[in-house]
Image (cartoon, rainbow, N blue to C red):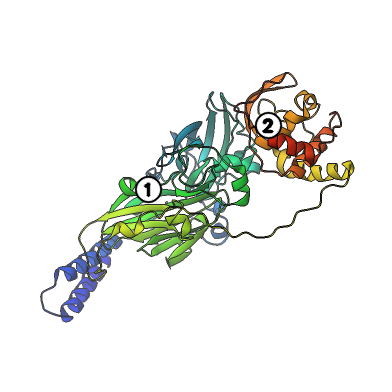
Amino acid sequence: MKTTSRLLLTGLVTTLLTQCGDKELSPNEKMSQATFIKAMESYETAPAAVPAPTGDALANPTKQQDKPVLGTENAVLTDAPNVPPPITRDHPTKVTIKLEVVELVKRMADGVDYTFWTFGGSVPGKFIRIRQNDEVEFHLMNRPDSKMPHNIDLHAVTGPGGGAAASFTAPGHASVFSFKALNPGLYVYHCATAPVGMHVANGMYGLILIEPIGGLPKVDKEFYVFQSEFYTKGPHGEAGLQPFSMEKALTEIPDYVVFNGSVGAMAGDNAVQAAVGEKVRLFVGNGGPNLVSSFHVIGEIFDNVYLEGGAKPAQHQVQTTMIPAGGSAIVEFGLEVPGTYILVDHSIFRAFNKGAVGMIKVSGPENKLVYSGKQDDRIYQMEGSTIQSIAQASTQQAPAANKEERIARGKMLYTSICMACHQPEGQGIPKAFPPVAKSDYLNADPKRAIATVLHGLQGKVTVNGETYESIMPQLGLNDEQVANALTYVYNNWGNNGTEVLPAMVKEVRATVPPPATAPGAH
């Protein structure tokens, strides 16, 4: 039946094309006919689809019938823009995933370096591809030369924290936990160790695909695209090794917005390749940590969009799709004409001024019936980054009137900023974050404590006889806020009751430079 239908429809298309002009088909008309025949052949030879779930299984795929778990395998992991091959087995299996945390200096832009915290040595982290109902044993290794503890929160994991608590791993250690891949879809994973925003902002994110039972429809090319932003102490383009800026991250004004970890990672010589007539699928993630992406491919329409990383296409013929921070999408489109197709965040200054540009270079014959224009990549060159600002008035809360008020305000600051690392009772986290309760480091020298909060701290520091080597970020607090937070700490958990005043903070800010490394405190 399918063969007969194909022959009849092919004859009809040929008749219509010849009736539009001469009896002989033109080269472009022959190309259109060939494209149609290829599509019909694909339809004829396509394997029978797995029956779609119905009823409860449609709303809850965990109730869909499946085969028993058989065998074992090691997951194939790839660096962007590459994607592991599709899952071909028709049953779930026991899968082992091994992922190493690496802190290293890499290129952010030409002449600009950055210390990235990574899953697997690259930004974004490795692409993980498994199947629905696979039983996963996950190994997270943190290299001995890391400065920070790390963990992983996989949005694909059903359970508190997404694996974060089970995978908390100090430098030089490895953690193992397991989960079952209950829900199909494309999911973000990221580090969730405090300070969470800092870990994400430094590059700790990636994608894990849980293929549905029966798999995804076949396409010709698949690519891995991950958008994120970076906040550096120096402005966009300032050369050298740039440190992370907590102040800029808190204002959500990044210096760089990029695809796949750096400016140009998917552009120019790094562009991905495809051919006319192929169907392309992009697995797109957004690590944030703050911005929502308006993902768009200039010159293409998305045939199918799997909104927010769902397992089924929810919309068709889409120009731009929104991807929230910590979210994803799958987009599919066919390639009709050759040229360079530009991937952008259509919040357009992010693309042409901050780096969110990628390229798909498509080769093959022209089809002037579809598009008669001339390829010209020059319009997509970077335009640079010039900051423009307008001064605006602002108001601030009146200073604390007394010590009690200062402690009350300091408690709010500690709870919102400090508690994740130093814990509700100031006890810290062993081998990761030092205690602020009964702290000999704080009680011995209030000026040193003020400088630590103002400038941040990295390197070895000894507190209550234990040595810690982690990073405390510069928090960007004003003098009143530093005074309030420290006064709260000094007046709780067995500390010496010092009241830190804004004038003391102002003096330290003016006279004590940021330390190159942590001072030794014993």
Q: What amino acid type is highlighted by mark number 1?
A: Met
In this view, 360 is above or below 138: below
Q: Is residue 248 visible?
A: yes
Which residue does the image show at 82% across and 48% down from the upper left?
Answer: 399
Q: Nearer the viewer, residue 440 or 202?
A: 440
Residue corresponding to mark 1: 266
What amino acid is labelled 2 in the image? Val
Q: Is residue 211 left or right of residue 498?
A: left
Q: Nearer the viewer, residue 91 or 413?
A: 413
Q: Quadrant of residue 333?
A: bottom left
Left or right of residue 70, residue 434 in this image: right
Residue 512, numbered circle: 2
Secondary element under disc 2, as helix, strand or loop, is loop
For marks 2 and 1, the one nearer the N-term is 1
Q: CA distance from mark 2 to mark 1?
A: 43 Å
Q: Give the x, y percent position of residue 82.
A: 38, 44
Q: In the figure, is residue 17 to the left or right of 415?
A: left
The relative height of residue 422 versus residue 232 in the rendered view (above or below) is: above
Discs 2, 1 touching: Cβ within 8 Å: no
Q: Secondary structure at mark 1?
A: loop
**What percent of the width, then of the height, locates residue 275?**
26, 55
